[in-house]
Amino acid sequence: MIAAVGIEWSSSLKECAVVFIKEDKVFAPKPENVQCYNEFFKFIRMSILILLQLIINYLISNKGIKHQGKWLLGSTPTRSITPLIIEESTIINLLTN
């Protein structure tokens, strides 16, 4: 949708959303399953945090590129690709909250 607005197929994201997003079925949580949903969410969140920690450990052990409190992922001496920049404070917040 951002690209569509960028190349002026639509004048705004709201206008673009009307074209791109079609509501088919609406699912509402079942009140009796809220505890299950919450436990599943905790599991997924913990899994993501573990993967993030593995990525951080990989960067540290492989002398990942860190500059001014930011980790640069994807940039290597032999490859020139646009790096993903992650604020160190974001990583800390994810790991501690």
Image: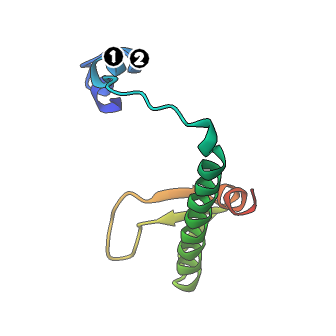
Residue 28 visible in rendering: yes
Q: CB under 8 Å between callouts 2 and 1?
A: yes
Residue 64 vs residue 42, the one in the foreground: 42
Give the x, y percent position of residue 43. Answer: 60, 62
The residue depicted at 36 percent of the width and 21 percent of the height is: 17
Image: 58 above or below 88: below
The residue depicted at 52 percent of the width and 57 percent of the height is: 85
Residue lying farthest front?
A: 32
Marks 2 and 1: which is nearer the front?
Answer: 1
Residue hosting label 1: 18
Residue 45 vs residue 70, the one in the foreground: 45
Q: Is residue 39 left or right of residue 44?
A: right
Q: Quadrant of the C terminus?
A: bottom right
Residue 80 vs residue 26, the one in the foreground: 26
The residue depicted at 59 percent of the width and 71 percent of the height is: 50
Amino acid on which disc 2 is placed: Lys
Amino acid on which disc 1 is placed: Val
Give the structural element (helix, strand or loop) at label 2.
helix
Q: CA distance from mark 2 to mark 1?
A: 7 Å
Q: Is residue 83 left or right of residue 81?
A: right
Residue hosting label 2: 14
Q: Which mark is residue 68?
A: none
